Amino acid sequence: MSFISRLEAIEIIMSELNENDLIISTTGMISRELFHVKERPGNFYMIGSMGLASSFGIGIAMINNNKRVVVLDGDGSLLMSLNTLPLPRYLEISNFLHICLDNGLYQSTGNQKTISNSLDFAMIAKSMGYENSFSLEGDANELKNLINDIPESLSFINVKVSKEQNFEVPRVSIDPEIISSRFSRFCLEK
Amino acid sequence: MLPENFVKALKDRNFLHFSGVPDSTFGDLFNILENDQDLNYVPAPKEDVALGIASGFSISQKKSCVIIQNSGIGNVVNTLTSFNGIYKIPVLMIVGWRGHGGKPNDAPEHWIMGEKSPDIIRNLKLPLTLIENEEIDDIDFLNQLDGLIDEINKQNLPGVILIKKGVIK
């Protein structure tokens, strides 16, 4: 069975999420593809500071507990921030959906391998206190159903995606200061 | 400056949300933060995580502080430059200053960073104020703090108050 691409996974995720979800996307191709698939003021494209999406998302989730925070991580950035995984449970955060799009590569730097194929992120997340933790083998329907059914909670999903790269996807072209100011306003909306 | 006076001054200025990594420079300060019901303090495993969390508070329109030791400055440089600096996310960074003046002051692991800490922050072009006089009175301390907060607000950037060991008793 072949895995869906990261771009397809992002399309599925974005079609199933809530309108008012606060989405933080990690550095590199994931932010570019999110920008390409569904641009919205509730998206925070983190173009630098690889590995910081989850800690930034935790701070946001603690203050905005009327909304769900969705962190779109990659396997490379998640490996950089494993020390952050125990915090949501410790802080009793329940409006947090952490998704890792795992292609086993640092793709934007030229397809170097990560070490993700020798470990089980979902098992790690479970042991770090995530209430629900799933590992998907890149099947479109499974992902769609899971995102649709997942309760408001502290949850983690690892999605294995293919190594396919879409070279047409542009860079995030919005000024970082604008990304910040409109996201900040979006947080305050109902 | 007593740690409880410092915390009160921060509360008076509407800083209620904190994240950090403990530092003995600040004496009882961390215990006070953890036990004060009005305050939200998140213990972070590393300094960049603390800055990420505090930035999450800040973008949610809550004034936030990071409290760390200067040995952790290196761990936040990328976050300050490729994140807070370009997205303009302000945070008050309270940094304990071990190894002030460099060798032979303090323990060997603090010599180099103790000497370089102010230069690193200046090189990043971030607002900075230094508290070097252990006997500084509270009014002067708070004037410097307020000057820094003004600069943080004006520039929309993180700013650093670097506090020598011995100032907070």
Image: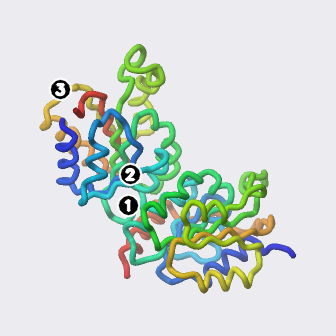
Which disc is residue B57 wearing?
A: 1
Q: Are marks 2 and 1 on the same chain?
A: yes
Q: Residue at x 24, y 55 (%)?
A: B36
Q: Residues within 10 Å of mark 3 (few under 14, many from 20)?
A: few
The residue that disc 2 covers is B19
Chain under numbered label 2: B
What residue is rendered at 56% in x and 60% in y? A128
Residue B108 left/right relative to A33: left
Q: Is residue A2 above or below residue A91?
A: below
Which mark, residue B135? 3
Q: Mark 2 near mark 1, Cβ–Cβ under 8 Å? A: yes
Q: Nearer the viewer, mark 2 or mark 1?
A: 2
Q: Mark 1: which secondary structure? A: helix
Q: Nearer the viewer, residue A22 or A183?
A: A22
Tag 2–tag 3 contact (CB < 8 Å): no
Labels 2 and 3 positioned on one and the same chain? yes
The figure's colour scheme reads rainbow
Based on the displayed image, in which of its 4 quarters is residue A143 positioned? bottom right
